[in-house]
Amino acid sequence: LTAADVEAFKSFLSTPASSLFTTIASPDGSWTPVNEDDLIGYNKDWMDKYVGHSQLLLKPKSTEEVSKIMAYCYKERIAVVPQGGNTGLVGGGTPVYDEVILSTEAMKEVRHFDEVSGILTADGGAILESLSNYLHPKGYMMPLDLGAKGSCHIAGNISTNAGGLRLLRYGSLHGTVLGIEAVLPDEKGTILSVGMPGGRGGALRKDNTGYDLKQLFIGAEGTLGIVTGVSIMTPRLSSAVNVAVLSVPDFKGVQKVFQETRGHLGEILSAFEFWDQEGLELVLHHTGQKTPFEGEPEGGRAFYVLIETSGSNNDHDSEKLGSLLEHLLESEVIADGVLAQDETQVASLWSLRESMPEAAGKLGKVYKYDLSMPVKDMYSLVEEARVRFEEHGLIKDGSIKSVVGYGHIGDGNLHINIVADRWDEKIEKTIEPWIYEATAARSGSISAEHGLGVMKAPYVGYSKSDESIDVMQAIRKLFDPRGILSPYKYLPPVKEPQAAN
Ligand code: FAD
Ligand code: 2HG
Ligand code: ZN
């Protein structure tokens, strides 16, 4: 990055850029840091695990500004990392070295809402919770919800293909996103608009004219272009929401409850989450909440399940949920169950689950794994992990403080949070690649929803074949021929062909 680069960027922007070096003072061309503090929060991630050294933060206000930036970066071969709310959990949104940070923070407007179809069009930097708040008075809701909703941007959600707490009901973003506007890292800073209202074809539910290009951007983690706009299908807001939390003696019971719940509740089921005893204790300790259950579970351990229903007839839904609970209690599949009586209780039961990442973060440094696998194989992995850390002496010496299992059972997605007293190579090497091998042995995926980022780029081979990785590399090169977008992330480096002897 040179002084001339910074001046060029400034000329493209209507808002000022933050730079460590906005004053170019000395004759040798070195710069004077003026606002280092401004950049700290953008250089490190939510977990404090990944820390970069970017010297420049750009907050463009329009797609056209992004286009000028990307054309310039292409010309000058300047590496860029797109950043939204910086809540990602795999080190995707922070620089590895000194890449320029391009933040969507200043692009956060709703562009259009169609009250008949429920199609919402917004800038990429719109915060998920703001979009929910915009939709609620109109009787609509966002099809995704996650604990980071107060900070994450819709383009960040799309770029990570975030799953979250409602995927079971409303499906993945591959189904709900209808259109994407993105700026490509090419000579012109091409603005690619696919399935956006007003464009050729517009935002359509059904469109079979050629390759579905928008799908490539969903989960691309900023490797193909900068997502500046999105159109998304939003469902009607449910007028009746009911929540129950159950205590289940063992993980076999959790699977039984899941089976029974799907059978009994059918189309009104909107979430099915679980967590273990360690998880409950962690959350109670760090939030100061009280357990909703009477007394201790038998043997001091249980699993906990949160069931949510969303529908339009409260009498019908609560009767169904009530009779499910009765059935589970009578058949002794569950030990206890609590049904929320009002909105406050709904929120407090949800917070037992939603507070998990934050509570783990308060205890220590958290090695996080988000794995997909058949439900029956999930919890044995958590147990194996505990045995492994025990055998390696990491529990005894206090390096590992807790191993928590929780997640989105309804989607076959297990979260393991391994809470350590520090970031440490020895701890990491005991976990990785063992955990990826154990996942592959269960025919699982090493990332169910958080993505690859810098953390899992070297390990994607555990979930994808060499042929798939080669095709992904080729797609990446097509969109980003100079390799300037989020380098060092997402995929392993391209293998150079062996020279013939
Ligand atoms: P960032 O963290 O800023 O970026 C994430 C990735 O997207 C990076 O690779 C970045 O380069 C890229 N990116 C960002 N903006 C753009 C853009 N405009 N164009 C191109 N690429 C871009 N995830 C889940 O899937 N499910 C959950 O339930 C969930 N719960 C969470 C709870 C908490 C408390 C926290 C901290 C995180 C959680 N996450 C969850 C992870 C994270 O919030 C999501 O991955 C979220 O979608 C990231 O959005 P963001 O705007 O913060 O993106
Ligand atoms: C969740 O489901 C998120 O709460 C975060 O995906 C999981 O922090 C984690 O490991
Ligand atoms: Zn999750």
Image (cartoon, rainbow, N blue to C red):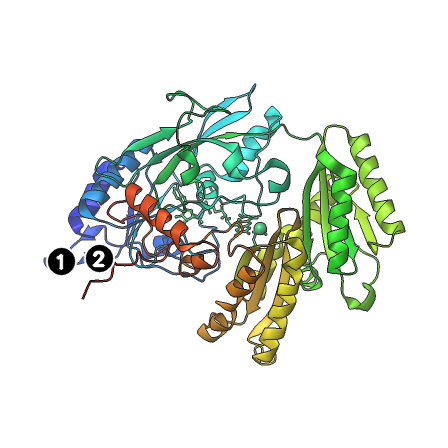
In the picture, measured across the screen, residue 386 lies left or right of residue 74, that is right
Q: Nearer the viewer, residue 29 or 465?
A: 465
Residue at the left extreme, as displayed: 27
Whether 459 is drawn above or below 257: the answer is below
10 Å neighbourhood of mark 1: few (<14), some, or many (≥20)? few
Q: Position of residue 261 (x, y in %)?
A: 76, 44
Rounded to the nearest angstrom, the CA distance separating label 2 from label 1 is: 8 Å
Q: Amino acid at mark 1?
A: Ser
Q: Which residue is pictured at 68% across the width and 56% down the height?
A: 376
Q: Are marks 2 and 1 in contact (CB under 8 Å)?
A: yes
Q: Position of residue 248 (x, y in %)?
A: 78, 57
In the picture, measured across the screen, residue 189 lies left or right of residue 329, that is left
Q: In which quadrant of the rendered view does residue 182 lie?
A: top left
Quarter holding the C terminus is: bottom left
Disc 1 marks which residue? 26
- In this view of the protein, can residue 230 be seen by the observer? yes
Q: Which residue is pictured at 42% across the width and 32% down the height?
A: 212
Q: Amino acid at mark 2?
A: Thr
Question: Is label 1's Cβ within 8 Å of ligand 1?
Answer: no
Whether 428 is drawn above or below 152: the answer is below
Q: Position of residue 33 (x, y in %)?
A: 25, 57
Give the mark nearest the N terminus, 2 or 1: 1
Whether 465 is drawn above or below 219: the answer is below
Q: Which residue is pictured at 52% across the width and 65% down the height?
A: 437
Which numbered dot is residue 32? 2
